[in-house]
Amino acid sequence: MARDTCSHHWQAFAAGVLTLLMILLSACGEEERGLVEEVAETPVETFLTLSPTSTVAAVLTPTLTSGPAQVTPTSATITPTPTFRPTEQAPTPADDEFDRELTDSEEMRARRDELVRRRVMPMVSDQRVIAAMQAVPRHSFVPTSYLDQAYNDHPLPIGYGQTISQPSLVGMMTEMLDLQPGERVLEIGTGSGYQAAILREITDQVYTIEIIPELAGVARRLFDTLGYSDIHTLRGDGYYGWWEYAPFDAIIVTAAPDHVPAPLVAQLSPNGGRMVIPVGPPGGYQSLWLIERHGEDVTMHRMFDVLFVPFTRE
Ligand code: SAH
């Protein structure tokens, strides 16, 4: 009998603990669901109508190695150390593999002006960014089969499962960098080379890294042909940044990792360096973050949701 009572007590206790656990778990679940919904409610088609808002401003511990972007209210020491980075020369594409239209024309210029006026100027106020987008012949950066869509405001395939980003998003991300002439900027994800050319219109210190050799090769040839030959290119895994030329006043990442690569934070200038980076799970929407570094303090602002190709590793 005594045992029975004891077991009753035990059962009641266990039930109580279970209930408490379930309440706690469901509370956590609510939070998680809220977060997921926030992301899901912002489909990429509508992000252009959102005005950028700073929903999170906190200090990042730049030692994240995996998982989604985490923000913790602590400061950490950022120790810049050289990191292993396998690289090679980009192969020069043969003429028949270099499928790009290099000439500009009245018609292309007119389409470009129209795109900038209708889709970029409503979102971007930095005159340098607008002038850059009016200057760069976007149609030369897409395969010739997409020439007629080069000045539409959406991404386009560039081969190897990759895309050239949507023009208005290129404009907004470039504006977020607040790039000044003469500043040094690093891009991870050269892709078509379009974003790098936009950066080169603003500053003469452009560094860009691409992991896929064929894309790196096509972009290199485009830069040499279109008057952007002083853009520095590298074929390799941009996770490690480009140590030899650090620190960078600005870093722009155009593929989405699931966490902020620590070497990139370490290579950001401690004197007000800015990094724009999409962070999120592969295959889902990501959040675009603006990261600013002042000394050892790294502040992250969450801007809006985007959809980028995954950041790959080697
Ligand atoms: N900025 C480009 C967008 C290209 S899409 C443009 O203007 O066209 C993103 C690119 O990032 C792809 O070409 C992809 O191969 C590249 N990429 C993905 N992971 C990378 C990594 N770890 N290092 C360098 N490039 C990477």
Image (tube, rainbow, N blue to C red):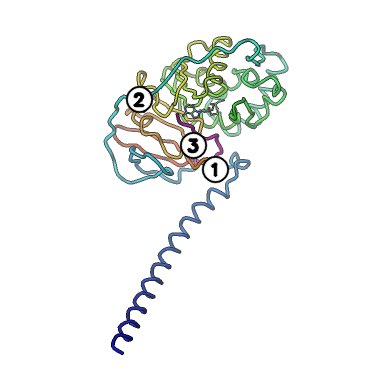
Q: Bounds of the magenta span?
A: 303-314
Please name whichever residue, 135 or 64, is drawn nearer the observer in this view of the structure. 64
Q: Is residue 124 above or below residue 11?
A: above
- Position of residue 107 relative to residue 59, above or below, is above
* Residue that badge 1 annotates: 285
Q: Quadrant of the C terminus?
A: top left
How dense is the environment of label 2, judged by Cα within 10 Å: few (below 14), some, or many (20 and up)?
few
Say if disc 3 is inside 8 Å of ligand 1. no
Q: Looking at numbered disc 3 in the image, what kind of residue is underneath it?
A: Pro
Question: Which residue position is annotated with label 2?
Answer: 84
Tag 3: Cα neighbours inside 10 Å, few (<14), some, or many (≥20)? Answer: many
Residue type beneath disc 1: Tyr
Q: Position of residue 59 (x, y in %)?
A: 34, 42
Q: Quadrant of the N terminus?
A: bottom left
* Lateral position of residue 182 relative to residue 305, left or right: left
Quarter of the view holding residue 294: top left
Q: Residue at x 58, y 50 (%)?
A: 41
Query: How far is disc 2 from disc 3 in space, using C-alphas?
Result: 23 Å
Residue 107 image point, x, y percent = 73, 17
Q: CA distance from mark 3 to mark 1?
A: 9 Å
Is 58 displayed left or right of 90 in the figure?
left
